[in-house]
Image (spheres, rainbow, N blue to C red):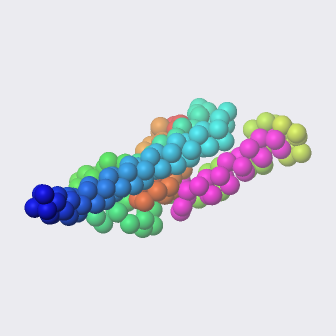
């Protein structure tokens, strides 16, 4: 029996490290899965907040268009893994327009895309009063202005480095974009019709 006992002890000693290793892998997998779920939850919460804040608001141009949530996943290219400043070139590439395509067009980048400050892109109380044909003290104008300021504050709070990018001509895609996760870009998009 002592021989059996020693054999058992030997087996338990050799199995313990495997159990510990398995537990470590299980913890890592659970942590990784938890991190992924947290990212999804944060993105879902961001989406819900932005959709609620922009609900019923439209971008006024030749055709009023609603805002919709968008997200661009973190870049797979090492040079874009850090949250560097969101430039025109970086945003175009993240939209799926390669540097090779940009170079092949032989146009300056600012002919493909332009950046507009957020405070100039969103309407102010004077714009709203002008569109309504009333004064800035009109209760409806004041209420709508509060909604726009609330949306602006939410965008600045939830997104880092918020910028507005306008892509195209005539039917211009407008993106209010910023970083919301490790290299991930999100925000609101709409269309501006300008003939």
Magenta stretch: give its range: 141-166
Residue 116 in the image, given as x and y percentages of width and height: 55, 56
- Is 192 displayed left or right of 154 in the figure? left
Which secondary structure dominates the residues rendered in magenta? helix
Residue at 31% in and 49% down? 97
Residue at 75% in and 38% down? 131
Give the camera-side residue of 162 and 183.
183
Judge whether 151 appears above or below 7 on screen.
above
Q: Is residue 69 visible?
A: yes
Q: Is residue 99 visible?
A: no
Residue 39 in the image, given as x and y percentages of width and height: 46, 50
Residue 158 in the image, given as x and y percentages of width and height: 59, 55
| Magenta span includes 12 | no
- Is 169 displayed left or right of 57 in the figure? left
Give the camera-side residue of 195 and 126.
126
Judge whether 86 appears above or below 139 on screen.
below
Residue at 81% in and 41% down? 143
Residue 87 in the image, given as x and y percentages of width and height: 43, 62
- Is 10 displayed left or right of 26 in the figure? left
């Amino acid at each position: 029996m002592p021989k059996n006992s020693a054999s058992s002890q030997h087996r338990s000693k050799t199995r313990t490290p495997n159990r510990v290793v398995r537990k470590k892998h299980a913890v890592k997998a659970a942590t990784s899965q938890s991190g992924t779920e947290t990212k999804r939850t944060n993105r879902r919460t961001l989406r819900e907040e932005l959709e609620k804040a922009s609900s019923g608001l439209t971008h006024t141009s030749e055709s009023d268009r609603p805002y919709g949530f968008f997200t661009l996943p973190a870049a797979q290219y090492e040079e874009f893994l850090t949250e560097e400043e969101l430039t025109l070139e970086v945003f175009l590439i993240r939209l799926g327009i390669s540097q090779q395509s940009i170079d092949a067009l032989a146009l300056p980048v600012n002919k493909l895309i332009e950046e507009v400050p957020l405070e100039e892109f969103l309407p102010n109380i004077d714009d709203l009063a002008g569109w309504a044909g009333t004064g800035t003290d009109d209760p409806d104008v004041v209420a709508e202005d509060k909604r726009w300021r609330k949306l602006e504050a939410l965008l600045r709070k939830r997104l880092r480095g918020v910028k507005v990018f306008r892509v195209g001509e005539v039917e211009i895609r407008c993106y209010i974009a910023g970083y919301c996760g490790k290299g991930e870009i999100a925000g609101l998009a709409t269309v501006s019709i300008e003939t």
